[in-house]
Amino acid sequence: MPHLFAKPLKMGSVEHFLAEDHVRIDDLLQRTIGEQPTIDYDVYKEFRRGLLRHIAMEEKVLFPTIQRLRGGTPLPAVAKLRLDHGALGTLLMPTPTPIIVDSIRTILKAHNALEEGAEGVYGQCEQVPGVEMENLLRRLQAVPPVSVVAYSDSPTVFAAIRRVLTRAGYDSEGG
């Protein structure tokens, strides 16, 4: 699904780089399960790695850098984004099902809307005094692929999914 922005994105900006990664990840998720109720596990594997790397870019580089530049204060929406990251990471633990994929899609739709666009976190990050955009962009691009572990379908994982979805403000029924 194409993303619409309130303003054109500056090529080479952090916002452009991360929003384009959203498009790539969304495309992989769409290809994971199209009109049919079956999962393309090879595409999902690529989606899973891509989403985990994207989360790592934000959690290990973007959010800490901006918080440091703001004197230790994170941007207000970062707390919600971190809850979403926890929910997404937990949903990636079990073998994917159509319900899990749908839950991920629902979270990403709301999550990406908080990050993109004129009022989004990415645009806010670019406005923080002292941010060195080229250096930040290089550091984001340098985040290595994330190692993924085998799926776990244990009752403990599904209990954790219910807890993190509830904590992040999402309905955990069916997950």
Image: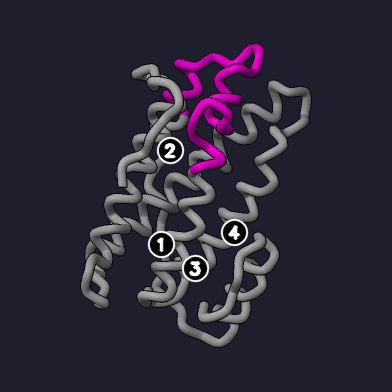
At 33% from the left and 42% from the top, the residue drawn is: 23
Q: Amino acid at mark 4?
A: Gly
Dot 2 or dot 3: first in sequence order is 3
Of the residues under marks 1 and 4, which one precedes in the sequence?
4
Contact, CB < 8 Å: mark 4 with mark 3?
no
Give the residue type at disc 1.
Val
Residue 109 magenta-drawn?
A: no
Q: Residue sitting at 59 percent across and 74 percent down?
A: 172
- Residue 17 visible? The answer is yes
Residue 57 in the image: above or below residue 123: below
Q: Are marks 2 and 1 in contact (CB under 8 Å)?
A: no
Calculate the distance from the C-alpha at mark 4 to the C-alpha at mark 3: 9 Å
| Farthest residue, direction bottom | 155
Q: Is residue 120 highlighted in magenta?
A: yes
At label 2, the amino acid type is Val
Q: Position of residue 21 (x, y in %)?
A: 36, 39
Region rendered in magenta: 113-139
Please report whichever mark, 4 or 3, sits nearer to the chain's N-terminal start.
Answer: 4
Q: Quickly name the residue at label 4.
A: 86
Residue of label 1: 148
Q: Secondary structure at mark 1?
A: loop
**How far is mark 2 from mark 1, CA to CA?**
15 Å
| Real-space Cα separation, disc 1 to disc 4, in angstroms | 15 Å
Residue pointed to by mark 3? 91
Relative horizontal placement of residue 128, taking residue 157 as reference (left or right): right
> Vertically, is 49 above or below 121?
below
Q: CA distance from mark 2 to mark 3?
A: 22 Å
Residue 143 lies, with reference to residue 81, above or below; the image says above
Q: Quadrant of residue 14?
A: top left
Question: Quick one: SS at disc 3?
Answer: helix
What residue is shown with label 2? Answer: 143
Gap in angstroms between the C-alphas marked 1 and 3: 13 Å
